[in-house]
Amino acid sequence: EAQVTQNPRYLITVTGKKLTVTCSQNMNHEYMSWYRQDPGLGLRQIYYSMNVEVTDKGDVPEGYKVSRKEKRNFPLILESPSPNQTSLYFCASSVAGGRTQYFGPGTRLLVL
Amino acid sequence: ELKVEQNPLFLSMQEGKNYTIYCNYSTTSDRLYWYRQDPGKSLESLFVLLSNGAVKQEGRLMASLDTKARLSTLHITAAVHDLSATYFCAVPDSSGTYKYIFGTGTRLKVLA
């Protein structure tokens, strides 16, 4: 089944404790992206990647890191999480930039 | 800076009625995407509009794009309860990158 998977789906952590949210797609998509969703703000793009080793900042990249070492994986790293990073995070992928995106199930993060 | 505005933000309507959701954006773009999000779920693609005057229809939903007016509409015909969801439009950043800006979403509730 073609899909985008994210792990974990739910995470509670404390301020400053490094964490990684994984994202993987099995559709051989070139483009991958991370978004956060907050009430009243819609989705805001954090980072995106056009292909392996090619990443670029979205609208709200501060406090996040990404890497794209393999085509199928695009992990989101929070080196020192803070409470304002409490949010619902979505990973998405598409065949190429400019095409419709397929979204993962979401990761709900709470930073205490 | 590209801004994407949707209105209304909330819409409660009776089954069988027609209504239109509007998506305005502030800079030139020849592409626009509509997504649907059911409560507690991820996003799924509804329409991709790729040129001025593009019109797409799927069931009771019809989307159109006017790039000169920087406006897209999502028209709902004879609403049914199953259409209750949040609808987002998204526009690629005009700088030629594949950064996306989403609207804040329109939460639609169709009352039986």
Image: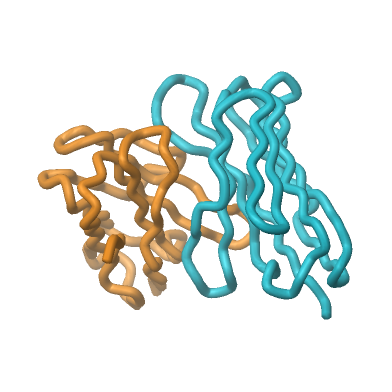
Q: Position of residue B40 (x, y in %)?
A: 53, 74
Determine which quarter of the picture holds residue B31: top right
- Along the viewing direction, whichever of A45 and B13 lies nearer the viewer: B13
Residue at 55%, 30% in the rendered image:
B50
Instruction: Check the image and name the residue furthest to the bottom.
Output: B112
Q: Is residue A47 left or right of residue A41?
A: left
Q: Quadrant of the N terminus of chain A?
A: bottom left
- Along the viewing direction, whichever of A43 and B110 lies nearer the viewer: B110
Q: Position of residue B36 (x, y in %)?
A: 58, 58
Q: Is residue A72 left or right of residue B14?
A: left
Residue at 58%, 73% in the rendered image:
B39
The answer to whether residue B65 is above or below residue A3 is above
Q: Position of residue A30 (x, y in %)?
A: 24, 40
Instruction: Check the image and name the residue furthest to the left.
Output: A69
| Chain in orange on the image | A
Q: Quadrant of the C terminus of chain A?
A: bottom left
- Along the viewing direction, whichever of A68 and B37 lies nearer the viewer: B37
Residue at 86%, 57% in the rendered image:
B18
Q: How is the image coloured?
A: by chain
Determine which quarter of the picture holds residue B5: top right
Residue at 60%, 62% in the rendered image:
A39
| Chain in cyan on the image | B
- Along the viewing direction, whichever of A30 and A88 lies nearer the viewer: A30
Q: How many marks?
A: 0
Q: Is residue A68 left or right of residue A85?
A: left
Q: Position of residue A80 (x, y in %)?
A: 27, 58
